Amino acid sequence: MYQPSGEELKSIEAWFAEYDALAEQGAIEELADLAVFPMNLATDVPDGYAAVRQWTRAEYIEAMKEAMGGGTAGLDLQSKRTPRFISPNLVVVETEATMTIADRKESMHYADLLVRTEDGWAFQTMVQGGWGYGWPAAKRG
């Protein structure tokens, strides 16, 4: 089992600090610069099964504009992230987050696969339940 160094853990924290700052600003193009495409997505279909997809950069940007609007500033977003290193170049980061929307607290639980590239960390796979509205259920084989 790979044990990350303190410096490796700090590099993940720094990557998410940059991501969070861009998300607050609603800087979707810059967020896309922190990813590797095609991006893998895994979610589920309400009252159904898992659903998987790949997004191009353009599809990611379109989806994030719809989901984030002008950014996350003002949502009082609190995140607890747990990185789990598979190797020095692959890390799954599990996030438990809470945000306030119209005086109502919303909780989210999701995971991202970050991969180390020549330019630094990038997210490549997003896993979160509940995004699969209208998506076909996954099929084996």
Image (cartoon, rainbow, N blue to C red):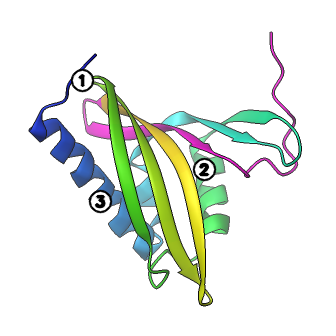
Instruction: Please give the residue where the numbered disc 3 appears in the rendered image.
Output: 18
Is residue 120 covered in magenta? yes
Instruction: Please give the residue where the numbered disc 1 appears in the rendered image.
Output: 88
98 sits to left or right of 62: left
52 sits to left or right of 134: left
Residue 134 versus residue 26 in the image, above or below: above
Identify the element where label 2 is drawn: helix
Residue 102 versus residue 20 in the image, above or below: below
Instruction: Please give the residue where the numbered disc 2 appears in the rendered image.
Output: 60
Residue 13 appears at what percent x and percent y?
A: 24, 51
Instruction: Give amino acid for label 3.
Output: Glu
Question: In the image, what residue occupies the spot 50% across and 43% down?
Answer: 111
Q: Tell which circle, 1 or 2, labels the residue nearer the N-terminal end.
A: 2
From which residue to which does the magenta span run? 117-141
Of the 4 image quadrants, the one containing the C terminus is: top right
- The answer to whether residue 8 of the structure is visible from this angle is yes
Q: Main secondary structure of the magenta part?
A: loop
